[in-house]
Amino acid sequence: MTKTRLGKSDLPVPRLGVGAMTWGDPTGLARLNPAKLAYGGAHGFDEEKRALEASLAAGVTLFDTAAMYSNGASERRLGELARGQDVLVATKFPPSPFSRTEAMPQALDASLARLGRNSVDLYQHHFPSNRVAIPKLMDLMADAVEAGKVKAVGVSNYSAEQMRIAHAALARRGIPLASNQVEYSLLHRQLEVNGVLDACRELGITLIAYQPLASGALTGKYVTGARPTGFRRFMPYFRRNSLEAVRPVVNLLREIGESYDKTPAQVALRWLIENESVLPIPGAKNGKQAADNAGALSFSLTAAEIEALDQATLAWRA
């Protein structure tokens, strides 16, 4: 497995990660988590374990979770499964949309306790908020790095300007901003024109791409007219007129994949991996999905194929 540094940090990461948002067994109101209702849970402890094992067997060692996912259930499950394994763990602050800046140290300790670890490889600010002052939060992040509780600092859902503020605040402490985790796929390309991707390249920040398969729209599973169950059926990708627009993209992915014996999903992931600044983290609810995702690492696209996909999805840059 070829590894690269996460941004300008010293953290070596694979070119693909795993999103563990749906892992774990939520209780109480956490069962009503929108992500759970949209995507469903994983297939239980055994399949989550198979997902981790299949990923590790392919050299995919980075797993992403968050304190907010099912009120900590995802962190607890990932910590349980990763114990004794060579796993890189990324998690996020805050545990609640109502958390304030000064809550970060306590929230980090709570995440570490759920994960059963003394340190986390990547600690990220989940989303910008009026309750959280970016410079002050980055100072607290730097304190956590110096205390040995955090190895690399990242953000998530940050604009280009917010990234620059965070980057400058950390730089004053001699610490790089390693990553910005944002939605990015062939069907969600706005960050190519809103300055986020350019700022990542300029500042040496890795763009971690969540929902790299557009919530499953790029797998080809739904282009026949079938729609997913749960809340996901109401997402923009799965409206009937959107499915018609997605069908030519999936057909092109399938056509390209045939020459490599790869699926549309694997080609869609590979399109992201071909960009050295980007690290996709598709979700994996079971061992088969994890193994299928890892298949994106075993081939490369030609410049002509990348250009064809670029041109076919220009409408999703708007």
Image (spheres, rainbow, N blue to C red):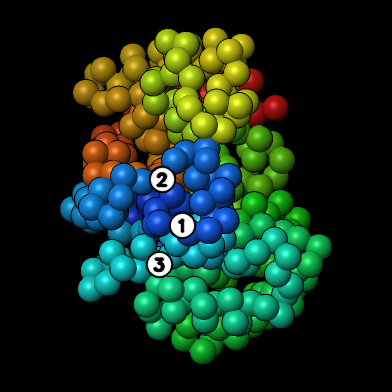
The answer to whether marks 1 and 2 mark residues whose Cβ atoms lie closer than 8 Å is yes
**Left-right relation of 265 to 153:** left
Q: Is residue 115 above or below residue 243?
A: below
Residue extending farthest to the left is 57
Element under disc 3: helix
Where residue 236 appears, as percent x and y from the top left, is: 62, 26
Q: Residue at x 31, y 68 (%)?
A: 80
How many marks are shown on the rendered structure?
Answer: 3
Where residue 285 appears, as percent x and y from the top left, is: 34, 44
Tell which of 147 and 8 is nearer to you: 147
User: Who comes first in sequence, dot 2 or dot 3?
Assistant: 2
Reading the image, the residue beneath label 1 is 26
Where residue 92 appears, as percent x and y from the top left, is: 55, 65
Residue type at numbered disc 1: Pro
CA distance for labels 1 and 2: 9 Å
Residue type at numbered disc 3: Arg
Q: Residue at x 34, y 17 (%)?
A: 254
Q: Which mark is residue 8?
A: none
Query: Neighbour class for label 1 at 10 Å: few (<14), some, many (≥20)?
Result: some
Query: Neighbour class for label 3 at 10 Å: few (<14), some, many (≥20)?
Result: many
User: Who comes first in sequence, dot 1 or dot 3?
Assistant: 1
Residue extending farthest to the front is 28
Q: Quadrant of the C terminus?
A: top right
Reading the image, the residue beneath label 3 is 76
Quadrant location of residue 83?
bottom left
Residue extending farthest to the bottom is 147
Q: Residue at x 72, y 75 (%)?
A: 101
Tell me, yes or no, if residue 210 can be seen here: no
**Left-right relation of 246 to 289:** right
Reading the image, the residue beneath label 2 is 41
Tell which of 189 and 130 is nearer to you: 130
